[in-house]
Structure formats: C-alpha cells, structure tokens
Image: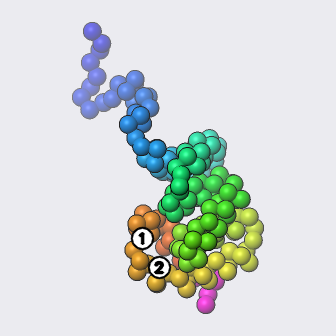
C-alpha cells in the first residue's frame, strides 16, 4: 500500500506529470504553446522561449487557413524568439487584408523595431494612433483577447510618434 499523501498535497508523480493535451484541438494546443512562450518571455527565460517556439510555430503553421488572431500569435512567438522575418511576414499578411488592423500594426511595430528599423516602426506607430478609434469600435474578438498588447503599444506610440 503506497504511503498516504497529506491532504491537499500532490504526490511527486502527480506534480511531475505533463498535462494531458490529447483531448485538445490543434488550435487549443497552439494557444497553450503561445501562452507558455509569452510567460517564459516575460520571465526572461530566453533558452526556454527558443525551445517552445520551435514547437509553437509549427503548431500554428498547421492551422490552415490561419485567421488574423493566429497570425498575430505566431508572429509574436517569432518576434520574441528572434525570428524577425517571420514576425514581419505575419504583420504584412495581416495588413494586406486590412491596412488598419491594430494587431497587424502592433506586430509590425515590434518586428521592425527588433530588426533595428526605427523609422519604419515610427511610421507604424503613427498609423496605429490614427487607426485606433475606428478599429476599436469594431470590437473584434482578437482585439479583446490582445487588448493589453494594443494598449501597451499605444502608450509607447504616443510617446515615440507624436502626431
């Protein structure tokens, strides 16, 4: 008979077991990887970001056709993992479909700034400031999901690219 585990404490085996993702849809798996990569990035764990980005990017690439939210997520993963070209490609695709899409502009700002193109980043910031009122009224689901990213980019844009 195994030793009793104190009430409320998980056994070592249970705490080390990976979560069961077999019942998740491909999109749910990709979204979990996005959340993990962003959390690791926020904690400054660049080696882990690289490791999980190598799984997350293909997970998003398998979701065809990609919607705007998935393109933004994949672009953000690419951006924090240092794949500026992939991040910029996602931003370009979003902006080709809608030149004022807030997430496309946010991603373009981040990708161009990471690539060292401050002039382009400032141009995208001006576009973000101009597009924001009308685009927010559209209340797209991806705007709600990534409201903190949009808000943070607007704060920086209003300092970096005044009208």
Quarter of the image for the N terminus: give it.
Answer: top left
Q: Residue furthest left?
A: 7
Disc marking residue 131 = none
Up-down relation of residue 87 to residue 55 (above or below): below
Magenta highlight on residue 52: no
Up-down relation of residue 109 to residue 64 (above or below): below
Up-down relation of residue 147 to residue 4 (above or below): below
Image position of 149 (left or right of 91): left
Q: In the rendered view, how is the structure colored?
A: rainbow
- Which structural element holds mark 1? loop
Q: Residue at x 69, y 68 (%)?
A: 113
Quick one: 102 or 6, which is closer to the camera? Answer: 102
Disc marking residue 135 = 2
Residue 163 % position (x, y): 61, 90
Q: Residue at x 55, y 78 (%)?
A: 100
- Which structural element holds mark 2? helix
Residue 123 % position (x, y): 67, 80
| Number of callouts | 2
Of the numbered discs 2 and 1, the one sitting upstream in the chain is 2
Residue 40 % position (x, y): 55, 48
Q: CA distance from mark 2 to mark 1?
A: 8 Å
Q: Residue furthest front?
A: 65
Label 2 close to label 1 by CB (< 8 Å) = yes
Q: Which residue is mark 1?
A: 140
């Amino acid at each position: 008979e195994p030793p009793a585990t104190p009430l409320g404490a998980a056994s070592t085996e249970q705490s080390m077991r990976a979560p069961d993702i077999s019942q998740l849809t491909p999109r749910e798996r990709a979204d979990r990887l996005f959340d993990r990569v962003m959390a690791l990035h926020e904690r400054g764990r660049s080696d882990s970001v690289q490791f999980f980005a190598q799984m997350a990017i293909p997970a998003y690439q398998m979701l065809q056709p990609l919607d705007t939210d998935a393109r933004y997520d994949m672009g953000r993963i690419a951006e924090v993992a240092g794949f500026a070209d992939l991040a910029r490609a996602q931003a370009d695709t979003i902006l080709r479909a809608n030149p004022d899409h807030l997430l496309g502009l946010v991603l373009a700002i981040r990708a161009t700034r990471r690539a060292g193109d401050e002039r382009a980043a400032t141009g995208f910031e001006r576009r973000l400031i101009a597009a924001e009122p009308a685009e927010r009224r559209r209340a797209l689901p991806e705007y709600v999901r990534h409201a903190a990213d949009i808000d943070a980019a607007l704060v920086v844009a209003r300092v970096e690219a005044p009208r």
